[in-house]
Image (cartoon, rainbow, N blue to C red):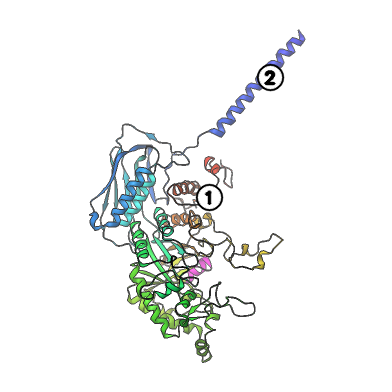
Amino acid sequence: MLIQSLLSSLLLLMLCLSSSTANVVATYHRSITKTVTTTNINVWPKPRNLTWGPPHQSTLLHPSFTITTTVNHHTNNHLSAAINRYINLIKTEHHRPLVPIVTNLTKNLPPLSTLTITITNPSAPLHHGVDESYTLSIPWNASTATLSAPTTWGAMRGLETFSQLAWGTPTRVPVGVHVWDAPLFAHRGVMLDTARNYYPVRDIMRTIEALSMNKVNVFHWHITDSQSFPLVVPSEPGLADKGAYDSDMVYSPDDVRNIVEFGLDHGVRVLPEIDSPGHTGSWALAYPEIVTCANMFWFSPGSQILAAEPGTGHLNPLNPKTYQVMKNVIHDVTTLFPEPFYHAGADEVVPGCWKTDPTIQNYLSNGGTLNQILETFVNNTLPFIMSLNRTVIYWEDVLLSDSVHVSSTILPKENVILQTWNNGHKNTKRIVSSGYRAIVSSADFYYLDCGHGDFVGNNSAYDNQTGSDANNGGSWCGPFKTWQTIYNYDITYGLLEEEAKLVLGGEVALWSEQADGTVVDSRIWPRASAMAETLWSGNRDENGMKRYAEATDRLNEWRSRMVSRGIGAEPIQPLWCVRNPGMCNTLQPL
């Protein structure tokens, strides 16, 4: 009996343990297979004001959904192109959010059949400072949503927001939604260098598409440099004939017109930069007589540096022919590009390059200065650019460089904007405190090429067996600028209220020593998306706190949607982090 009793007790204990283990295992499996959901709808960049419900309800998109407007399509080709593009996108995208949206799909609600657009000033041109605000409403019980905007360009921003509100198969949209939205900064740009490596037109157009998706409104096109001159200038065809890498690595006038028109169709200004007097070595292939130190070795220990990087050559401001060529180039570029801003470069003038020229040597030996030589160049080009009704942008060097700069007296503040790239907040402060308008592109935060090492060969710095990285892997502006670094950058930090008003906005920049069309998407996106949101609606919540934590989940979703739209944006986290909210944070979730 004792043995039987013991056996019975042991059997009961095993059953209890088995049941307990089964419950634990079942609970574990439920925890790892549970579906993560959200009641948030994701729009990037985050609108200034968006409300949805409660309750969180949605309705289906009608199969015959259309977008209508009272604006005459025949007089506004850009709006017509945008409407056609978004009708197709909204009806065919069928976006699948990484985290499913919880919403009541109410069969009693009519399907959404129409989005009606109202624009008060449809003829307003796409210039700096144009009103890009919009109001979007998707009511509860109506089959029509409304989008109102002062301008075509605000309507395009609203169309992008509406497209991001649609998801699923069949397509559904939230109802009871109201959006009021407008950018904090008027200038939100991406700079792309197409001279160090060539980018086919299709890559430029895809980049412009992505800019529009992110409500970025400026494509700053750094077209020429010392390494190549790919732009076909009708009055100076020899510059591209001899200065381009190859005959099929050029941008013809038709290419430029198509890119500019494509930009307007997407609400993106195409802003040309013809850098000078530095960074002009490629001009020497057509006009060797107007370029100093062309095709010389850029750097030799113990001697003067001739260029900031391999690829030497500066235009000679003391040669009158320089201005004949320059004025032809400027005239044709302003004809090809209707954009009212013209970027004239003027960065990284290297004294050693000019000093190789006998005429300049003689000028300096007779008491002249390098600053006076640069002033001669500016005085012979700036008035001409202004006479063509252009506002001139220069890199900050023209005023702030320690080696060669000009006096502010020859840079009229009403006609000149300075783009800052050195010394972070300090140089922004120097520019605006001097009364100039500023575009911020700090290399410490906004340079997308940083952190990939250097491109010069035969570099002993890489022969390092200690594992130390004192030189940031050879990158002068390393380390890599993460999306968090970009997102948390406050471009008006440390400025007085009146000084901050002079900051027009900012641009992230991709210099292309180690980039071309094969990597352009992943180098720019989604890091440029981080800039896009901070310049559109800021990087703080309604309580003034930085919102980078919740932005992580939203950027994961937005990056996924960009990829589905054909933009090769790089991932910012493993998908596991998206499926396990909070588990990849630095602090354990509550």
Q: Tag 1, which secondary structure?
A: loop
Query: Magenta residues, as a range?
Result: 421-430
Residue 151 appears in the picture as rendered: no
Instruction: Please tell me whether the stretch drawn in magenta is mainly helix, strand or loop.
Output: helix
Q: Is residue 29 left or right of residue 565?
A: right
Q: Which circle marks residue 497 in the picture? A: none
Residue identifier under label 1: 572
Q: Tag 2, which secondary structure?
A: helix
Whichever of callouts 2 and 1 sits on the residue coming sooner in the sequence is 2
Task: Give, as a three-letter code, the residue at label 2.
Answer: Met
Q: Is residue 284 magenta?
A: no
Q: Residue furthest top?
A: 1
Q: Is residue 38 above or below residue 465?
A: above
The percent coordinates of residue 96 (x first, y second) are 44, 41
Q: Residue furthest bottom?
A: 366
Quarter that holds the N terminus? top right
Task: Give, as a three-letter code, the residue at label 1.
Answer: Ile
The percent coordinates of residue 109 (x first, y second) are 31, 34
10 Å crowding of disc 1: few (<14), some (14-19), many (20+)? some
Residue identifier under label 2: 14
The percent coordinates of residue 419 (x first, y second) are 45, 69
> Mark 2 or mark 1: which is in front?
1
